[in-house]
Amino acid sequence: MPLALVIDDEPDIRELLEITLKRMDVQSICVENLDSARRSLKEHNFNICLTDMRLPDGDGIEFVAYAQEHHPHMPIAVITAHGSIESAIQALKSGAFDFLTKPVDLGLLRTLVKSALKLSGEQAQSGRQLIGDSQTMQNICKSISKLARSQAPIYISGESGTGKELVARMIHEQGPRAANAFVPVNCGAIPQDLMESEFFGHKKGSFTGAVADKEGLFQAADEGTLFFDEIADLPQHMQVKLLRAIQEKTIRPVGATKEIPVNVRILSATHTDLAKLVERRKFRQDLFYRINVIELHIPPLRDRKEDLPLLITHILKKLSSAAGMPQPGLSNGAFATLNSYQFPGNIRELENINKIADGEVALDSYLGDIEKQSIVQALEKTHGNKTAAAQLLGLSLRALRYRLAKLGID
């Protein structure tokens, strides 16, 4: 039978938690302070810990840090007073699995415990992988493994083409929600007038064209993970609604009169600098604060060139296998060309440099063609707006102007 450590100085709360856990077939040891909790940790192996934030001899955040150091495989959730969200977020940053607010919602408690207990068994492994053996990539893989054990919202930053969605999927697949849905949402691809319906669903007859009830993305991701890609593209009115859904853990479909509880983990990403958008009041500070509990930065390819040989081998193997042909080699000249290139499109651009001839990859002139094509496409997509095109390519405006002149693009 799983064993839980409950830490709270209020007898009524301890009794409530103990009874609820017992009904879930979870045995518990209840203590009233941190000193007793530390002694219990030396005597027992716990599958989960529930601790109050404020205790007679310290606070829950200190205990989270202690548990992370001495018992890193024990999921720990903090219980905080209603309105003390800042403290709960600080606990998540310190390594807490999740948090609850008082008065404790027993439904949310049971959901939290079930998720935490899944981590007690063998941790799920993702079939996906990040290619590279640089120290940078080793650190990212370690971070993914650690973040997968938490329920904290994660903000994945990095330029276009660095693999942010791949990282999000790995966090999901290595965590307790792996058996449930991973739902990616491209926030820039949904028309604004349909966004609320797409996110939260709608009831039949709620607007013209609503011929049947429709489930939204939050409901599709219930018990799983919802990944908001390019979250910077969310319009202001949807930022407000998304913030409320995250805070309240409920949604209201368009045309509905009642709210629906949802249990999703939120991951988000964008290639733009969200902090700067907050400064310019283009993105709500309170929403940024909620989605950016922990940031995981994915570096551009030009900053980890030592991974290039492994990446090239992996891509050539994948391409040749799909084409049903022997895996080609790479000439020294071709590799030198790749190694000196800055890859504004990162891994995505490298994957598209695949012109194969006579068993080798011919690239010297091809790189210029690819770069020119990428820039022209970006300019077409932004209707000639160089500033927007530079952001799309992950370049500074100055760097884009230099490339326009170099490649003779008018």
Image (cartoon, rainbow, N blue to C red):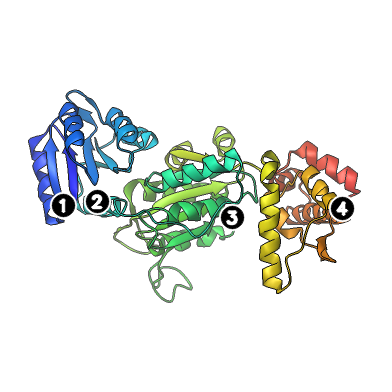
Q: CA distance from mark 2 to mark 1?
A: 9 Å
Q: Can see residue 374?
A: yes
Q: CA distance from mark 3 to mark 1?
A: 44 Å
The one nearer the camera, 105 or 322, is 322
In the rendered view, does 379 fall on the left or right side of 291?
Answer: right
> Mark 2 or mark 3: which comes first in sequence?
2
Q: What residue is pinned by disc 3? A: 188
The residue positioned 29% from the left and 34% from the top of the image is 67
The one nearer the camera, 252 or 48, is 48
Quarter residue 278 falls in:
top right
Q: Is residue 308 above or below residue 204?
A: above
> Mark 1 or mark 4: which comes first in sequence?
1
In the rendered view, does 208 fall on the left or right side of 377?
Answer: left
Question: Is label 3 in a helix, a strand or a loop?
Answer: loop
> Mark 4 or mark 2: which comes first in sequence?
2
Q: Are marks 2 and 3 in contact (CB under 8 Å)?
A: no
Disc number lying in front (2 or 1) = 1
Q: Are marks 2 and 1 in contact (CB under 8 Å)?
A: yes
Q: What residue is pinned by disc 1? A: 26
Q: Are marks 3 and 1 in contact (CB under 8 Å)?
A: no
Q: Position of residue 80 (x, y in %)?
A: 25, 36
Q: Can see residue 229?
A: no
Q: Is residue 309 above or below residue 356?
A: above
Q: What residue is pinned by disc 4? A: 364
Q: What residue is pinned by disc 2? A: 113
What amino acid is at disc 1? Val
